[in-house]
Image (cartoon, grey):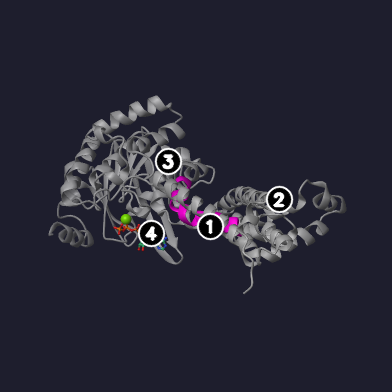
Amino acid sequence: MIEMKNVSKWYGTFCVLNKCSTSVAKGEVVVVCGPSGSGKSTLIKCINGLEPFQEGSITFNDISVGDAKTNLSKLRSRIGMVFQNFELFPHISVIKNIMLGQEKVLGRTTEEAEKRGMELLHRVGLSEHAHKFPGQLSGGQQQRVAIARGLAMDPVAMLFDEPTSALDPEMINEVLDVMVELAKEGMTMMVVTHEMGFAKNVADRVIFMDEGRIEEDCTKEEFFSESRGERAQLFLSKILHH
Amino acid sequence: MNYNWDWGVLVTAPYFGWIISGLGWTLAVAACAWLIAFTLGSIIGIMRTTDNPVARSIGAGYVEVFRNIPLLVQMFLWYFIFPELLPEAWGTWVKRGIPLPEFWTAVVCLGTYTASRVAEQVRAGINAISLGQKQAAMAIGLAPMQVYRYILLPVSYRTIIPPMTSEFLGIFKNSSLALTIGVLELTAQTRQIEEYTFQGFEAFTAATILYITVTFIVMTAMAVVEKKMAIPGMISLGAK
Ligand SMILES: Nc1ncnc2c1ncn2[C@@H]1O[C@H](COP(=O)(O)OP(=O)(O)OP(=O)(O)O)[C@@H](O)[C@H]1O
Ligand SMILES: [Mg+2]
């Protein structure tokens, strides 16, 4: 579904992505981890064209993301994305956040959009908060709304960029639960996270990045066994020990 | 000081009428100029936030030119010089063909000048929105225009209500410069009353009070608007 071949990206002379190649098949859950600044966010934002890249190619269902002729808005509407800081639209209510893309991008009627929106809010356990504004919800609730907003577009894949790292510990699980459920339903997911419990539970593969390179790209079994490389070993020992 | 106070002059014909008509022209100049300032200023401000380098430099150039020439000079340029630069028939039309040439000249001058200031407010308002918001809007598939229409503008216009109120009050007060090209707005009428009656203190007191009253009404109204438009749950915008 997602094919990434030798993708490189520079900010000036600084190489953020260094010949990254990987792929995500339909229904696969891939966890991306690595130290801060290693290029994880940049990598997944390249997939839906939020970040441009200079070399290599990315295709999503055989559509080239880097091609200037590609209708990026249309492509993005089929890939859900969840951000570290939720990024709900503050000036409209929770339900309107979920309806906006359905109405303006998919062309659904207000009734259809609202019906779908309420279903999804129900699913993430927030139907009674539909008419509140994002600023009136807790972080965990906001992130669940953000997931519902992504799902409302009926995406074929979901990208998550550290969805729980801005959350207090007690809210992390409410978000992870929603994600685990999604994964088990067969959603194609690429998740930047340091929640190794989540990775062990539902990931098919784990990608470890360091200094813009994909250092490890293996099954979760391999990753959590002793066969992984030294850098990943060191990184894991750090994040698992606190 | 030997001054004969006579407040009665303010309510005597024709002077009372002059004051009212002056206030009317002042409000008319300010309102029409604000339409230009708001529309053109928004467009210029938005242009400066796009990725298009041509649009950005046109916007930047506009702001530099209109913000850096003294307003009084701009008034004279529009009134005396601009018609001469046009082809002759057009120039004559601008000077005599259109109804109320002084009025419209003042409106265009104040409108285009204030547009440069409004543009800066709009630009600042949009740039204050985090990149993440823009990316989230694009990520659900909104096209660039839709990102502005549904996310960036509604949020930024709310944030810039206070400075935009100041800009409107600026246009209202600067409209007194229109007297230099012969628009009989409030300040001009006040001076005229002084010349006819020698009761300058009364006349200028009346004008001052009227300016302050209008300013006060606008500020109060905009404070109400700001409260009404405040985003629930966002402390920075003064909501509960
Ligand atoms: N606009 C930019 N200009 C220059 N450098 C940038 C820019 N954006 C990101 N970088 C750099 O690119 C590198 C990769 O950034 P990225 O956000 O992808 O890292 P990350 O792995 O997601 O880190 P984190 O875990 O902290 O989120 C970092 O070193 C960062 O400083
Ligand atoms: Mg990141």
In the rendered image, which residue does mark 3 sit on?
Answer: A76
Mark whose residue sits in front, 4 or 1? 1
> Which numbered tag is attached to residue A18?
4
Judged from the image, the secondary structure of the residue bearing numbered disc 2 is: loop
Q: Position of residue A184 (x, y in %)?
A: 22, 34
Which residues make up the magenta segment?
Answer: B153-173
User: In the figure, is residue A64 to the left or right of B12?
Assistant: left
Camera-nearest residue between A161 and B112:
B112
The outermost residue toward the right is: B88
- C-alpha span from label 3 to label 2: 68 Å
Camera-nearest residue between A9 and A223:
A9
Mark whose residue sits in front, 1 or 2? 2
User: In the figure, is residue B89 to the left or right of B164?
Assistant: right
Work out whether B138 lies above or below B178.
above
How many marks the image carries: the answer is 4
Q: Identify residue type, mark 3.
A: Arg
Q: Position of residue A106 (x, y in %)?
A: 44, 31
> Which numbered tag is attached to residue B14?
2
Q: Dot 3: within a 10 Å radius of its alpha carbon, few (fewer than 14), some, or many (20 or more) residues?
A: many
Report if residue B154 lies within the magenta region: yes
